[in-house]
């Protein structure tokens, strides 16, 4: 079945790196995504990775994909208080729909 | 603002009433998706359209739910005989529809069923 799992909470000090992890089950996914959701705001796409890649870097964001273990991670360098939000990983199913994880709440403290 | 818009943003209704939500996608996007998000969970796929054709419906979409996209532009989601378990955030997204194209999400309609 389709299932995407994430740890629920992560707390980091401002300036440190954050690593948010995700495991997924559908090996046929073409793309894997990271979305950010802030209170009262819609989902914002942060980055995505094609399934035949193992790493993608975009400014402070680094995505690592281990396709063998079906493990995806998002590293945020130099985490800022504005990064506090809920982060969702998602996989596409048949490039038609997204299956989201339960979300990881990132709290950044000074 | 040329993003995805949803109306209303909030809806409070009594159990048993019917409600209808509207989504206006980004104008050149031919795919439109509906998701539902309950507290503490990630969004769950409900259904999607390619132009005016409804191509897939999740098993979450009971027969009390119906979605339409009559002219391939805006879409409506109707819930008949609402139940307290229908209380959730209903999210709409649109995309160009090509492989891997980004889904742009609207702000959502928060439904509370009393």
Image (cartoon, coloured by chain):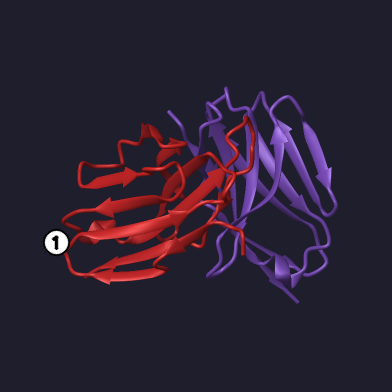
**Residue at (73% x, 72% y) in the render:** A81
Q: Residue at x 72, y 70 (%)?
A: A82
B22, A64: nearer the viewer: B22
Q: Residue B62, percent across and down?
A: 24, 42
Residue B59 at x, y percent in the picture: 30, 36
Residue indicated by mark 1: B16
Task: Report the quarter where the N terminus of chain A lies.
Answer: top left
Tell whether B56 sits left or right of A20: left
Q: Residue B95's x, y, as percent?
A: 58, 42
The colour of chain A is: purple
Q: Nearer the viewer, residue A16 or A51?
A: A51
Q: Nearer the viewer, residue A62 or B13?
A: B13
Q: Which image quadrant: the C terminus of chain A? A: bottom right
Q: How many marks on residues?
A: 1
Residue B41 in sight here: no
Secondary structure beneath dot 1 equals loop
Chain whose colour in the figure is red: B
For residue B15, side relative to residue A8 (left or right) = left
Residue A18 lies, with reference to residue B94, above or below; the image says below
Q: Quadrant of residue A36?
A: bottom right
Which residue occupies 76% across, 50% down?
A75
Q: Position of residue A5 (x, y in %)?
A: 53, 42
Q: Can I make out residue A21 in this image?
A: yes
Residue located at (44% from left, 59% from top): B40
Q: Is A7 positioned to the left or the right of A2 in the image?
A: right
The chain identifier of the residue carrying mark 1 reads: B
């Amino acid at each position: 079945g389709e299932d995407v799992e994430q740890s629920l909470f992560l707390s980091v000090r401002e300036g440190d790196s954050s690593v948010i992890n995700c495991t997924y089950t559908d090996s046929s996914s073409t793309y894997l995504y990271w979305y950010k959701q802030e209170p009262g705001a819609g989902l914002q796409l942060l980055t995505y990775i094609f399934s035949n890649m193992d790493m993608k870097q975009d400014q402070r964001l680094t995505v690592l994909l281990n396709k063998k273990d079906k493990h995806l991670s998002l590293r945020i360098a130099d985490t800022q208080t504005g990064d506090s939000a809920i982060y969702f990983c998602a996989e596409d199913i048949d490039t038609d729909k997204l299956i989201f994880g339960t979300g990881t709440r990132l709290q950044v403290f000074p | 603002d040329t993003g995805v818009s949803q109306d209303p943003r909030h809806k409070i209704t009594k159990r048993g009433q019917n409600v209808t939500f509207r989504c206006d996608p980004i104008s050149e996007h031919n795919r439109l998706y509906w998701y539902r998000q309950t507290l503490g969970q990630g969004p769950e796929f409900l259904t999607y359209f390619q132009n005016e054709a409804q191509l897939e419906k999740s098993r979450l979409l009971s027969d009390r739910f119906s979605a339409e996209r009559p002219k391939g532009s805006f879409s409506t989601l109707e819930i008949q005989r609402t139940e307290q378990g229908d209380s959730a955030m209903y999210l709409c997204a649109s995309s160009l529809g090509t492989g891997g194209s980004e889904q742009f999400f609207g702000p959502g309609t928060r439904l509370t069923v009393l």
